[in-house]
Image (cartoon, rainbow, N blue to C red):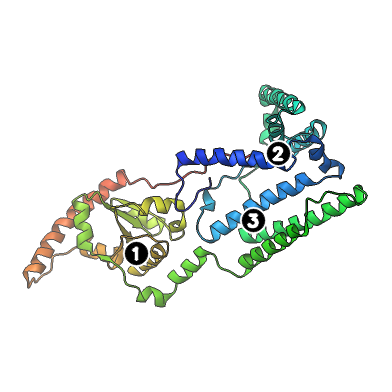
Amino acid sequence: MGPLVPDVIGNELNFVVALFIGIAFGFILEQAGFSTSKKLVGLFYGYDFTVLRVFFTAGITGMIGLVIFAHFGLIDLNLIYVNPTFLYSALVGGFIMGLGFVIGGFCPGTSFCAAAIGKIDAIYFIGGSAIGVLLFGELYPILYDLYMAENWGMVTVYDLLGTSHALVAFAFAVMAAGAFWFTRWVELRVNNGATSKEHPLKLYYAVVSILFVMGLSAFLLPSNQESVLDKANNPEIVNSIDVNYITSDELAFRLIDNDNNLQIIDFRPSKEFNEMSLPKSIPMTFKELFGKDAVKTIAVKKKLTVFVAADEKDEKKASIIASELGFENVRILKGGMSTFKAEILDFKAPTEVKTNQEKDTARFRAKATVEVAELIKNNKKAPVEKKKSKRIIGGC
């Protein structure tokens, strides 16, 4: 499964879900006719474009699903693996695979689909594929330079064009609709007007409806992330919200007491964080709050999460975002790090103390300024590791 936010499907359950999805995928391929070589090669001869329509439908469905999930903040697109592009090997490999597709009547995936229902030619095709894999492995040192040439990395269409995911999905949906119409027109001409009734008008109405929804989301509706960030950047909302504070004294006490339930999320710029950071603190940006890693870090039960920033205004922004995302048990440092530095780290004993409370506070801060400074020094040697999910390598 994809990197859902929150992580409702664990790594172990992922394999179970993948098994059932794989079974369903194979069943749909077989029902679509992908176990028949005649139907598969019809794409190249122009009499049957089922392959193109099925693959286009699958791609557009997956693309639209990702756009919708990302729009509502239900998936972390930054963690989705993208196969790296090696231009020359892709061109040569694509040509070889296409040639094998025409000659053998299958591609690697459809050959297994056909073999599963007992097609002998598909079993021979799989044997040939295995020989090809072994041959490539033996020739790899010779082919290495070609294989690795022109490495574009994990490039995507929307990155190259500098546009949004939704706009690219909309463009591909338009392309799919055009391809469906054109291929049906070609089939009618090649087959002299006789073609199957696999593509009723309802299919095209469905495509047009999807286009309308995609266009609406791509051009008119802001994403969940944009809406929340706009709210966090609204000065009136920032100044009016009620937040739970933690004072500099309480935070210092918890640090000295080595409170295991305390975790600090620091929203200062990385330069300031690297120069001086509190123990139990993790650097984070506003946008990272929307990611999967933020859920793993903040949504931990029985943990007291404290947001700190250079000033209280930025802390309130982070608090608004956290609240909109459903995070609870979050406090912000009263006055920000500037106040913490003035009251704790740079504390100077007052010349006049009037009450016992002031006397106790001064005594505590005189002790805290030394001990917290020592903790900060030790923290620089062994900082808290930031939880960071990795892209899972995969794909076909």
- The residue located at (44%, 53%) in the rendering is 6
Q: Nearer the viewer, mark 2 or mark 3?
A: 2
Side (left or right) of 323 relative to 58: left
Residue ranking furthest to the right: 192
Question: What residue type is disc 1 on?
Answer: Ala
Tell which circle, 1 or 3, labels the residue nearer the N-terminal end.
Answer: 3
Residue 277, quarter of picture? bottom left
Q: The C terminus lies in which quarter of the figure?
A: top right
Q: Secondary structure at mark 1?
A: loop
- Residue at image coords 51%, 53%: 76
In percent of width and height, residue 349 lies at: 13, 65
The numbered mark, 2 or 3, whose residue comes first in the sequence reads: 2
Q: Give the labeled residue for mark 3.
A: 158
- Distance from the alpha carbon under mark 1 to that under mark 3: 35 Å
Q: Nearer the viewer, residue 253 or 373?
A: 253
- Lateral position of residue 165 relative to residue 333, left or right: right
Could you tell me if the residues under marks 2 and 3 are in contact, i.e. CB atoms within 8 Å?
Answer: no
Q: Which residue is mark 1?
A: 310
Q: Circle 2 sits in a helix, a strand or a loop, which is it?
A: helix
